[in-house]
Image: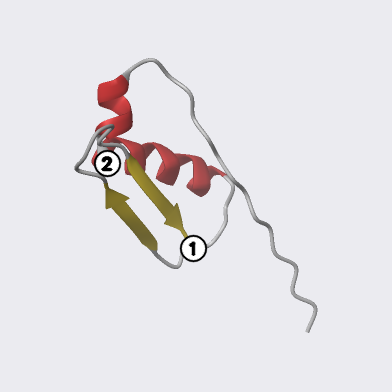
Amino acid sequence: MDDEGYHYLLDGVTNDLEFLKDEKVLYSLFLRVIKNTRMNILGFMSHKFTTDGQGVTGFFY
């Protein structure tokens, strides 16, 4: 069996700090991007920080 995989890192830049703090909006945006690549999504994990910058980090696998 010849499996070939791809790994993408996406890093967005914006001055809209509220956008970067909104976990649901970020999830929806990246989900649309990934679906356009026709990749299979197995799951999603994220963490919303509650101190200082209060940003979000997450990944699809």
Q: Residue 50: horizontal and vertical position, in percent?
A: 19, 43
Amino acid under disc 2: Glu
**Callout 1: helix, strand or loop?**
loop
Task: Classify residue 13 as left or right of residue 22.
Answer: right
Q: Decide which of 51, 1 is in the foreground and name it.
A: 51
Task: Classify residue 23 as left or right of residue 45.
Answer: left
Of all residues shown, which one is farthest toward the right? 2
The label on residue 61 is 1
User: Residue 59 sits in which quadrant?
Assistant: bottom left
Task: Classify residue 43 as left or right of residue 6.
Answer: left
Q: Decide which of 22, 33 is in the foreground and name it.
A: 22
Residue under the point 43% across and 41% down: 30
Of all residues shown, which one is farthest toward the left? 50
Residue under the point 54% across and 43% down: 36
Mark 1 or mark 2, which has the lower sequence index? Answer: 2
- The alpha-carbon separation of the residues under discs 1 and 2 comes to 17 Å
Q: Residue 61: horizontal and vertical position, in percent?
A: 49, 63
Residue under the point 75% across and 68% down: 4
**Callout 2: helix, strand or loop?**
helix
Residue under the point 33% across and 54% down: 46
The label on residue 35 is none
Label 2 sits on residue: 23
Question: Can you say whether 43 is above or below 54 in the image?
Answer: below
Q: Name the image quarter holding the N terminus.
A: bottom right
Task: Classify residue 57 as left or right of residue 5.
Answer: left
| Crowd band around label 2 with a 10 angstrom C-alpha radius: few (<14), some (14–19), many (20+) | some
Q: Residue 19: horizontal and vertical position, in percent?
A: 30, 26
